[in-house]
Amino acid sequence: MGPQNKEKLFNLKHSSARNVIERTFGLLKVRWGILRSPAYYPIEIQNRIIMACCLLHNFIHSEMPEDPLELETPDTTEPLFDGPAEFISTIETNRTWSNWRNELAESMYNEWLNRNG
């Protein structure tokens, strides 16, 4: 039995993607020490550092299909930042993003229905 509506399918897929992303960032932080602490570089440099780490990680994967680091890393997620965090207390809704999310959820659900009857 699958999801009963588009919202449940969207939430399932969103949660799954978030888990993969958090695990990936956890693995990148283990491999590349520069990602373990807050960076005080300009945002453009931070973006380049992250891209370089990702590219090197992907290169390692292309050369070593079984990465010993991944085998050692537990399959749990850890926070992306260990220090004090600024929390967002309110988020204003945006009709454009809400419409986009709803259209995406509808499309995903229709595709899922077509595949699963």
Image (cartoon, rainbow, N blue to C red):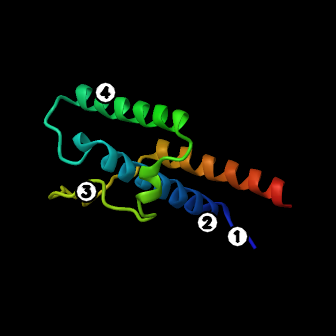
Mark 3 secondary-structure assignment: loop
Between circles 1 and 4, the one closer to the viewer is 4
Find the distance from the CA under tag 4 to the CA under tag 3: 26 Å
The extreme bottom residue here reads 1
Using the rendered view, name the quadrant where residue 73 is placed.
bottom left
The 10 Å Cα crowd at callout 4, few under 14, some 14 to 19, many 20 or more, is: few
Query: Which residue occupies 34% across, 61% down?
Result: 78
Residue 117: image quadrant is bottom right
Residue carrying label 2: 8
Q: Residues within 10 Å of mark 1 (few under 14, many from 20)?
A: few
Residue placed most toward the observer, 98 or 16? 16
Sequence-first tag of 1 and 4: 1
Q: Give the secondary structure at mark 2.
A: helix
Point out which mark residue 48 bears.
Answer: 4
SS type, badge 1: loop
Amino acid type, mark 1: Gln
Residue mark closest to the camera, 4 vs 2? 4
Task: Kindly identify which numbered label has been placed on residue 88.
Answer: 3
Type of the residue with mark 4: Arg
Q: Answer with mark 4 or mark 3, whichever residue precedes in sequence.
A: 4
Q: Position of residue 23 (x, y in %)?
A: 43, 55
Label annotation for residue 4: 1
